[in-house]
Amino acid sequence: MIDRISLRVALLVAVVSTIGCDRVTKHVAFAALAGGDVRSYLADTIRLEYVENTGGFLGLGANLPNAWRTTLFTTVTGIILRRPVSNALGLWLSNSGAYRLQFC
């Protein structure tokens, strides 16, 4: 029982830490690099420049209008993830002795 709780706490800490570090580095990059010149180090081996990715992974959908991009990355993604989340929740509830739920 302790192992399951420890595993869940460790997973939660890892997820929160990852999201927190991502937000902090984005804030630092914006504060230090936005509107400034390109910063070059080690004879231009390392170059820092502020660039925003308005799309998804690797700029996917960056050229779409805002309304389409919002629909694609929130609504459609939510619909796609509905089934695996409901299956995982149903499996978790059935393993915990509760009745099985199926949302789809």
Image (tube, rainbow, N blue to C red):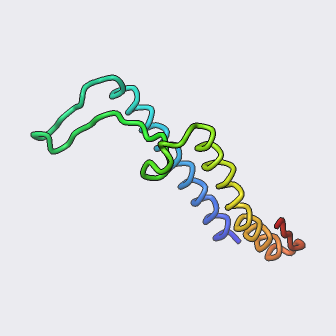
Residue 96 in the image: x percent, y percent? 81, 73
Is residue 9 positioned above or below 28 on the image?
A: below
Nearest the eye: 28 or 60: 60
Q: Position of residue 98 (x, y in %)?
A: 88, 71
- Is 56 above or below relative to 38? below
Q: Quarter of the image holding residue 39?
A: top left
Find residue 10 and report its horizontal and vertical position in percent: 57, 60
For residue 92, which quarter of the picture?
bottom right
Number of numbered discs: 0
Q: Quadrant of the N terminus?
A: bottom right
- On the picture, is 74 further left or further right than 57? right
As drawn, the residue found furthest toward the left would be: 43
Please provide percent x and percent y for residue 60: 47, 51
Nearer-the-camera pick, 70 or 104: 70
Q: Is residue 49 left or right of residue 75?
A: left
Q: Is residue 9 left or right of residue 91?
A: left
